[in-house]
Amino acid sequence: MCNRARLADGPDMLAKHFPVDWWADRPRDNRFDPRELAPRGRACVIRRDARGTGVDFMAWDVLGGQARVPMTNVRNLALPQWRRLAEAPENRCLIPLTEFCEWTPETHDVGGGRPIKGEMWFRLLDQPVFAVAGFWQETAQGRGFAMVTCDPNPLVAPIHPKAMLTVLEQADHERWLTGDHADVIALQRPYDAARMAVRGPEFPTRRKTTAMPDLFG
């Protein structure tokens, strides 16, 4: 996975799309940017506790910096460390997004240096703000989360053939947060490609870019 995603309008609009009973204290340092998700950066996470459903702010690394590479995405839910989280509703969460990115598999010559890969940005046609299935846990560095991945659908597969984020139907939010382990396994599935769109490739790291065609129209 590219490990880049966005929540275009930030946390203030979440109450319009999700039931929100409580809010955690928002981080106040200048490094916190809820609109641009990056590994180990903090992001908005929706979880359930005794107060109801709330918006928390966690680091995108479910291992809390214990590994050299941030653990941002999990897929094999049969592994003991992930099965433990999958079986516990209190450790499940929703990660609200408006789009997510994957790099093109090939590089492009866009001028200004060596060829680079482009960014392909995926969004949903029927959910302007959608929820990705996730797990969270307490770590020595605070709360951390990971997104759950699944097999890619036909729109994502040409760009990233190994996996895509597990995007949930709105009707399945409650099932993910409160269901049993069988519900978790059943919901780990690709979203309908016909209800998604993609734009790109984009090359924001180059000042001078060559216009490229939209690969998927």
Image: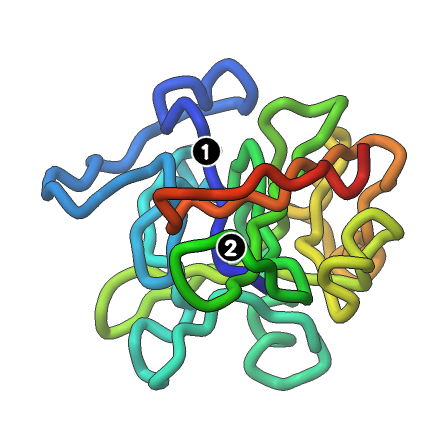
- Residue visible at 38% across and 55% down in the picture: 38
Q: Where is residue 119 shown, x and y percent of the image?
A: 56, 50
Q: Disc 2 marks which amino acid?
A: Glu
Residue at label 2? 90
Farthest residue to the left: give it. 29
Q: Where is residue 30 shown, x and y percent of the image?
A: 12, 41
Can residue 74 be seen in this snapshot?
yes
Q: Where is residue 9 shown, x and y percent of the image?
A: 41, 22
Whether tag 1 and tag 2 are in contact, CB under 8 A, the answer is no
Please say if 176 is above or below 81: above
Q: Quadrant of the C terminus?
A: top right
Tell us which disc is closer to us: 1 or 2.
1
Q: Quadrant of the N terminus?
A: bottom right
* Left or right: residue 84 compared with residue 111: right
Q: Secondary structure at mark 2?
A: helix
Packing grade of label 2 (10 A; few <14, some 14-19, many >=20) is some
Residue at label 1? 7
Q: Disc 1 marks which amino acid?
A: Leu
Q: Quadrant of residue 45?
A: top left
The answer for how far apart the CA atoms under marks 1 and 2 are is 24 Å
Can residue 174 be seen in this snapshot?
no
